Image (cartoon, rainbow, N blue to C red):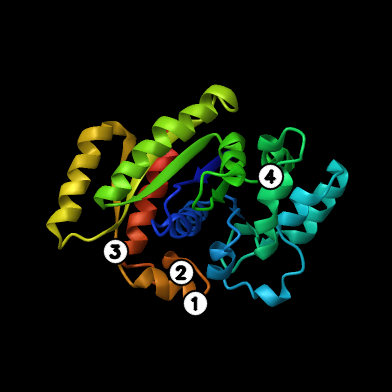
Amino acid sequence: MTKIISIANQKGGVGKTTTTLNLGAALAELGKKVLLVDLDPQSSLTISLGIEMSELEKSIYDLIASEEENESQSIAKEIIIKTKMKNVYLLPSNIDLSRAEIELMNMIDRERVIKFILEPFKGFYDYIIIDCPPSLGLLNLNALTASDEVIIPMETDYLALRGAGILINKTIKKVQKKLNPDLKIAGILATMHNTRTLHAREVLDMLREHFKDMVFDTVIKETVKFKEASVDGTSILDYDGNSEAAESYRSLAQEVLNNDK
């Protein structure tokens, strides 16, 4: 049974793309077949996987723009890319996706367009992981409406802590009430954690005190290795598989699998 997970936070620079890529790679390492979906017009996930943007003729935007369901499925087969990693596939994005927010406004059932696009892939992949844009717009609402679960990456910073509360108490609860009552919060993931600063340690403590069991045990520490892996067009597991950073995402993947039991 396919599980769809959104990696979402309206704040930028909190590790959404890093988490999408490396959680996907860690699940694939455990034998799962994974489809990564780049739903961000900035295309950071697509770029981080070494895709040459100038050679990308079609993207997920073409699926959103297609009017016929059969046409959409046919386009999907052309668009999906096999990545360098075993069992990891990509539904890429490019700058065309920036037009989608406006065009979705005029579509019937506009919050469920991504749900309909991903429906044919259920049963073919074990996990579909969506990298969401840093906003609270229609693309984000589409991702949450299509998902079984949402993971919220959160930098261990006080302002980020406040932002996570807004996302949970307003956006996610609104989606659960009106669009997707089955949506669950898989957990809040502390990212870009700097153990050397008192502020980061205090925020991590506040996060665990306030959100309790909603917070993953895994903490992703700040390291330049994630950027180096992106330059290499692959995951941290393939770039430096014995590093603490790689082990952190293996730990997160195990927590995600344990939640499914």
- Tell me, yes or no, whether the two marked residues, 1 and 2, touch with CB atoms within 8 Å: yes
Instruction: Please name whichever residue, 208 or 2, is drawn nearer the observer in this view of the structure.
Output: 208
Q: Earlier in the sequence, mark 1 or mark 4?
A: 4
Alpha carbon separation for disc pair 2 and 4: 24 Å
Mark 1 surroundings: few (<14), some (14-19) or many (≥20) residues within 10 A: some
Task: Say whether residue 184 is left or right of residue 146.
Answer: left
Q: Is residue 39 above or below residue 136?
A: below
Label 3 sits on a secondary structure element that is loop
39, above or below 260, in the image = below
Which of discs 3 and 4 lies nearer the camera? The answer is 3
Q: Amino acid at mark 2?
A: Asp
Amino acid, disc 4: Phe
In this rendering, the label closer to the viewer, 3 or 2: 3
Give the class, few, some or many, for how many residues have Cα within 10 Å of label 4's Cα (few <14, many ≥20): few
Q: CA distance from mark 3 to mark 1?
A: 18 Å
Residue to which mark 4 is pinned: 124
- Residue 232's disc number: 1
Q: Is tag 3's residue or tag 4's residue first in the polypeptide sequence?
A: 4
- Which residue corresponds to the image point at 33% horizontal and 72% vertical from the top-left? 224
Identify the secondary structure beneath mark 1: loop
Residue 207: % across, % down: 24, 41
Of the numbered discs 2 and 4, the one sitting upstream in the chain is 4
